Image: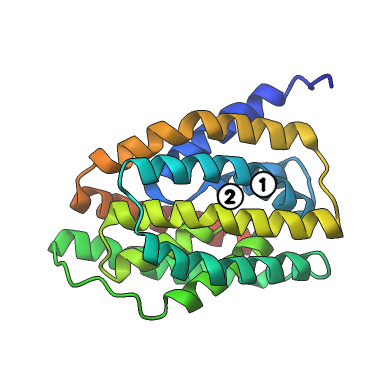
Amino acid sequence: MELPPDFLVFVVIGLAAQLVDGALGMAYGVTSSALLAFFGIPPAVASASVHAAEVATTGVSGISHGLFGNVDKQLLVRLAVPGVIGGAVGAWVLSEISWPWLRVAIAAYLLILGAKLLLRAIRNRRGEPHVRGVSALGFGAGLLDAIGGGGWGSLTTTHLMARHHEPRIAIGTANAAEFFVSLAISLVFIFTIGISHTHVVLGLLTGGVIAAPFAAWLTKRLPARGLLGFVGLFVMGLSTYNLVRALA
């Protein structure tokens, strides 16, 4: 198969997106989906393409985080199982209808949560990690990730940090769980609308696989307080951008 000239562009985007996603636990799907939307690709097709690429990138990322000790296995199961169910339901819903107002609601919610994380980093207050509501979090994040073409990391990572889980554990566990969610979403899309724009999928996949191991290593090396504060700032900036874009 002859690849089009813009293939390398998608490789670079996939590499950059996975580097941020693997290190901060979010933004691969959001960045990739925004790019595909810019090229005029419909939301359902964009989400299908992104999640097809994420099956490989999140697999490599999850293994890398596991090797660096960034994954809590019990937390992974609590997050992944309902996430798979929510993702499958969301993919089916997106293949039938579109809910654009969800982007505004999610962006506003994450803006508040990002501010909370930043404030906690400034105050340097730590509490005991807990898993209350993690199953509901997994289902909701999987559902919205499929419908919005991204957002699993933003929702799960920030919530786990808000529940006082160590930043590298929150990021690594969310990345590992995302593999199972992306696989479920991709399978539903294959059976409903199929997979098109193969060169986009291959480009995002290639760049993401290259960046994943380094991003996992970086997560283990970054200081917890600094990582928490940076994630808070990143979520606030990303949410503000999404709000402005959605309301424009």
Q: Residue, x 71% and y 37% (percent of image)?
A: 201
Marks 1 and 2: in contact by CB < 8 Å? Answer: yes
- Mark 2 or mark 1: whose residue is earlier in sequence: 2
- Secondary structure beneath dot 2 equals helix
Residue at numbered disc 2: 29
Give the quadrant of residue 165.
bottom left
Query: Tell me, what colour scheme is on the image?
Result: rainbow
* Disc 1 packing (10 Å; few <14; some 14–19; many ≥20): many
Q: Is residue 126 shown left or right of residue 91?
A: left
Residue 199 placement (x, y as % from top left): 76, 31
In the foreground, 108 or 159: 159
Residue where numbered disc 1 is placed: 50
**Residue 57 visible in the displayed image:** yes
Give the x, y percent position of residue 131: 34, 75
Q: Is residue 103 visible?
A: no
At horizontal 38% and vertical 48% (from top left) the residue drawn is: 24
Relative height, residue 206 to residue 197 (above, below): above
**Marks 2/1: CA distance?**
6 Å
142 vs 154, left or right, is: right
Residue type at mark 1 is Val
Q: Quadrant of the N terminus?
A: top right
Number of numbered callouts drawn: 2
Q: Amino acid at mark 2?
A: Gly
Camera-side residue: 20 or 64? 64
Quick check: 130 above or below 225? below
Residue at image position (50%, 33%) is: 16
Q: Which one is nearer the viewer's eye here, 62 or 4?
A: 62
Q: Secondary structure at mark 1?
A: helix
Q: Measuring from the top left, give residue 118's x and y in whole percent.
A: 26, 60
For image coordinates 35% across by 66% down, the residue present is 160
